[in-house]
Image (tube, rainbow, N blue to C red):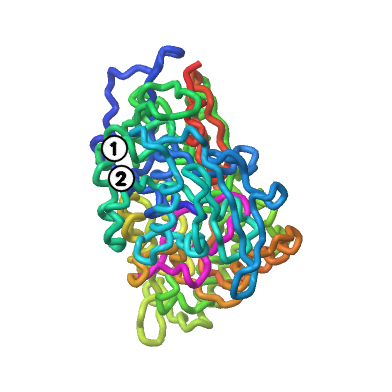
Amino acid sequence: MRCLLAAVGLAAALATPATAQPPTPGAKDELVIGITQFPATFNPYIEAMLAKSYVLAMTRRPMVVYDKEWKLVCMLCTELPTLENGKAKVVDLPGGGKGMTITWTIQPEAKWGDGKTLSVDDFVFAWEVGRHPKSGVPEGEPFRRIQRIEAHGPKSFTVHVDKVRFDYSSYFALDPLPAHLDRIHFADPENYRRRTAYDSDTGNPGLYNGPYRITNVALGSHVVLEPSPSWYGAKPYFKKITVRAIENTAALEANLLSGSIDYIAGELGLSLDQGLAFEKRHGARFDIQYKPGLIYEHIDLNLDNPVLKDRRVREALLVSVDREAIARQLFEGKQPVAHSFVNPLDWIAATDLPGYAFDAARAAKLLDEAGWSRLQAGFRHNDKGERLGFELMTTAGNRTREAVQQVLQSQWRRVGIDVRLRNEPPRVFFGETVRRRAWSSMVMYAWLSSPESVPRSTLHSTSIPTAENNWSGQNNPAFRNAEMDSLIETIEVELDREKRRLLWRRVQEIYMQEIAVLPLFFRSDPFVVPKWLAGIEPTGHQGVTTLWIENWRAR
């Protein structure tokens, strides 16, 4: 499962009072965090967006998560189900074939913030939402594979699934939704996304089961969180946490230096180049680390665009860009060029596959062959007199992405491709444009994933968002490839690690051959932490640092 890497009033973002002072070490019991996006929704199952994940990680606990060592561990469960301990089993299905049963035990003290016991019914409700084709959940496949849920009292249950998967302990790990508050809003599944209590009654403590609960939301500006009295784990240190959305990264840095915010989220803050520059100017006041991770910056190509249907045009777009030069000049070589969606840090990476090097001459040859051979006013045209042009969109206010955009535009112009830039606030870009595939040519953003993350939601042909499926799925380019579909389905059920490695290699090979996406970089996030703040431990994957917010404290 992946996450999209949304908006703020600029006047609020730029407010940096001259009287604000840096915090006094050891005297803080309130924390103000700055991030570059504002969540488009607070429902944990609707839309995939990093800003939402970052905030909700302080208020909810998933059943399982990968920790900083990239090891799968329990959070809301008491023991990880495995084939070895007998809590996961491969079973024969009545009609033939193999399925699984996976038995979970919920933390006995887990409650919702209003004191209501967190029970099996909350997992059943989450299953009902996830499996409904009109609910708008981005990745409905794991829910639809669950045939039934068998309760063993209020705190234990077995899921019966119709498929064997190697990653059964994470893939079929449901995360609960508060049935006592939100089931009533699911009476009309197609409109659930607009009626969920997470957006209509966000401050209701019963929506949350983690160390904090949301107490106030100023849409597009900030979210306020306070400790939950029903939290069963270690008592959190901070009495109040405010998360401020400041989409302009220059304003974000200014707010940090003035003391208007205490900390910039490493996952949703400064880019690598900004972190490097910041360290040179202000490194003495902060502990700065650069965390490489499974963050894939890329450009999706709309394969329904008649011009982009031609693979030769897609390859020309890729080889006419000097990504190595961009990496050197903007990122001091600390963000490696990506050749597929799989990071070399992940064990499944096929590092021997050849990538596409910068080759302007080949780009020109490919465009000639594709019929874009006539130059007029510096741009390529076809025999009908149509200009070769595209629109490239990304998140407005992200200074690094906008700089990359301009370099790309310049390099494409050199081979005669006219690229226009149009950006939107992240909340609109992710919440509407990307989700509904309401873009004509190219969109640039990032995926954040977990180790060995199967790309069903992003590459399988059944995961293309459409009006008919209420824009579920994350295959935004509309990539359709029968062999890729088959490989994804085979990987999911292959329990042998070495056999999966070979299958993964072919997945990456097809991905690189088809060029439905232009790979750019694997990102490294700078974590700029004030010296008085302790407990932040970056993971480098989808498990955001705020999942361990109860460990954060002032020194």
Position in image of residue 172 (x %, y %): 54, 55
Q: Earlier in the sequence, mark 1 or mark 2?
A: 2
Given contact means CB atoms under 8 Å apart, are the residues at marks 1 and 2 in contact?
Answer: yes
Name the residue at 70% across, 60% down: 495
Q: Where is residue 416 in the image (x, y as percent from the top left)?
A: 44, 71
Circle 2: is it few (<14), some (14-19), or many (20+) Cα within 10 Å? some
Query: Which residues are the magenta region?
Result: 441-466
Quadrant of the image occupied by residue 238: top left
107 versus 400 height, above or below: above
Q: Which residue is drawn at 33% across and 45% down?
A: 180
| Quarter residue 524 falls in | top right
Q: Where is residue 482 in the image (x, y as percent from the top left)?
A: 57, 77
Task: Please name the amino acid that badge 1 sits on.
Answer: Asn
Residue in front for this viewpoint, 480 or 135: 135
Residue linked to disc 2: 181
Binning the other alpha carbons within 10 Å of mark 1 as few (below 14), some (14 to 19) or many (20 upward) gives some
Left/right of residue 421 with respect to residue 324 in the rendered view: left
How many marks the image carries: the answer is: 2
Judged left or right of residue 365, residue 375 is left
Q: What residue type is labelled 2?
A: Leu
Q: Which of 506 and 207 is in front in this view?
A: 207
Q: Residue at x 47, y 39 (%)?
A: 61
Q: Residue at x 50, y 23 (%)?
A: 286
Q: Name the residue under label 1.
A: 204
Q: Nearer the viewer, mark 1 or mark 2?
A: 2
Q: Is residue 354 visible?
A: no
Asked whether the viewer can see residue 201, the reply is yes
- Quarter of the rendering containing residue 24: top left
Q: Nearer the viewer, residue 194 or 34?
A: 194
Does the magenta run of residues contain 191? no
In the image, residue 103 above or below residue 96: above
Is disc 1 placed on a helix, strand or loop?
loop
